[in-house]
Image (cartoon, rainbow, N blue to C red):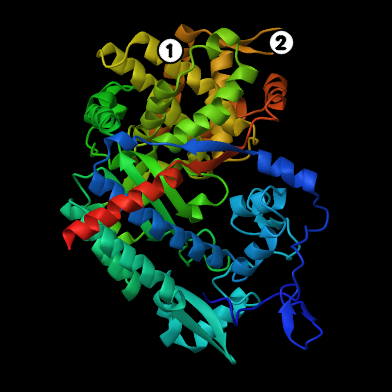
Amino acid sequence: MMRHGMVRTAFVVAMVATAGCSVERNEVEMGLAEGVDTADLAARVADFAPADIEFDEAALADWEKAVLAKLVEASDIMHELFARQVARENPDWAEQVARRGEDDAATAYYEIMVGPWDRQADHAPFLDVGGKPAGAGYYPADLTRQELEGWIEGHPEDREAFASPFTLIEREGDSLVAIPYSEAFGPELERAAELLQQAAELSENASLSEYLRSRAQSFLSNDYYPSDMAWMDIAGTKIEPTIGPYEVYEDNLMGTKAAFESFVTVADSAAGAELDTLKSALRMLEERLPIPDALKNLERGFESPMRVVDVVYTAGDTRAGVQTIAFNLPNDERVRSAKGSKKVMLRNVSQAKFDQILRPIAERILDPAMVEELAFQPWFTSVLMHELAHGLGPGFIERDGERITVNQALQDRYSAIEEAKADVVGLHNLTVLREQGLYDDAFVRAAFVGELPDLFRSIRFGASEAHGQANLIQFNWLWENGALSFDEEGRITADLERMEEAVRSLATELLTLQAEGDYERAGRVLEEYGGMRPEIEEAVARLEDVPVDIRPRYEVRDLMPEWEQVANRLEAAGE
Ligand code: ZN
């Protein structure tokens, strides 16, 4: 642990001298930030609904359980390191917060946020620790961007190490120095490497072993390129681990330092088979887009790097605050250009959000008869179709003899238009696949019903962000085309046949304006359909008690004692 010698707040170092002249840490507990009270914090905790993260344990062989046990243990190390990347004082604060008791709202919220700052409120402190430094725990708290840039200007030989995603910046006297993660977090990363080595020995899949050995080496060498490459080559195994420093969002000073995190996941063969079927239909779906043939994009590649997996365990950056349902890695451009990237969809986390958020939204805004048609699998298939639909339709356009992307043509209006396109093209695709006999009518109906509460998932947080805007466009379009109506109690009923037609006509509109790169037409769609109307606001008002997100409870924690025994047995047998 590096906590000795770290910057501490006056509060942390508050000492009391005892009679015997020895000095002890004051055992006061952590106080709340000014203006924050326990009831307020309890409400914030309640925004995160506890959700069990379960997976199919029965499908796992003994060696797989043993490997997973090692990965879960290594993940806990990632979590501990991430907490220190958030704030160097975090290990001390964690102890002080814990003194408030396990059931205390501050203790719970600290655990959810991995630190004393609220990720749902611009990192405002909820504990009495002051504001969050822009550079989190990656830099000295008092370091400004200006000072850092000045230092690099004066010491060009330091540029590479300072800009590296895998170093911390420290003061040494009057100097600034970059410390590689492999050094700053040396003992912890050595232990994590050891666990990955053990997992590699236990693994009966060569590509998985190769990744685990390579990543173990990265922890020690601080060079993550070879193991990012090996990660892209994992194949023929149920176990898909993603462990190490990845995203840079925690670094608000320079946006370069990578946060430790871990996704320990298992693939499900049925889900994989469905996804393969969808992927193999992509060319046909491009041909069946509701636009003239001349606008279709049949030259594009139709291979997709998507996977569907169930989470066994997550840790570090990804466990803090709102839980992700998908990630796209690696970030290293050298790996992306050599091998592409993987988009990994987390099915059981999606299911938890469906149960805890989507269903309660549906119960509050939909006609009860429609709520009965709601089901997870059709909704999740439409989520996969949304992701695949991003890869359909116009990508490049010709303008004044130049080839530009749709994104360049539509500029600030692109994101909202593209998100709405992915939704409606995805739903349209399901009707095409129904025609082909892949899905039955009830399944497609349920997917359309699921779209309605899904639209409100982001509308409830306002129309300022791309997803909120995209969803308002869809809702208003459906409404104006007679596919939706509000009853006297303000509940929404859909005419699903009309909804299919309206989804198709909106797909035609959005794909056409994308093919034409028509910035003005995109503006008119946003203007005419992107607004919040009183009926929508009334519906949103009924969602106040619906959780914002989930708080994962990992089933694997209960299984660990047994899995560790399995690992011990296999290790003894292998010696
Ligand atoms: Zn999207």
Pointer 1: what residue? 445
Query: Which of 240 and 97 lies nearest the eye of the viewer?
Result: 97
What secondary structure is found at the residue carrying circle 2?
Answer: loop
Q: Name which quarter of the figure residue 555 lies in.
A: top left
Label 2, residues with CA under 10 Å away: few <14, some 14-19, many ≥20: few
Quadrant of the displayed image that contains ligand 1: top left
User: Mark 2 is on which residue type?
Assistant: Glu
Residue 326 visible in the snapshot: yes
User: Mark 1 is on which residue type?
Assistant: Arg
> Which residue is found at the position 17% from the left and 63% from the top?
575
**CA gap, disc 2 and disc 1:** 24 Å
Label 1, residues with CA under 10 Å away: few <14, some 14-19, many ≥20: many
Query: Which of 467 and 245 lies nearest the eye of the viewer?
Result: 245
Q: Name which quarter of the figure residue 312 lies in.
A: top left
Relative height, residue 404 to residue 451 (above, below)? below
Relative height, residue 392 to residue 203 (above, below)? above
- In the image, farthest residue toward the bottom: 173
Horizontal side, residue 109 vs residue 325: left or right: right
- Residue 324: x %, y % from top left: 48, 44
Pointer 2: what residue? 489
- Residue 19: x %, y % from top left: 82, 85
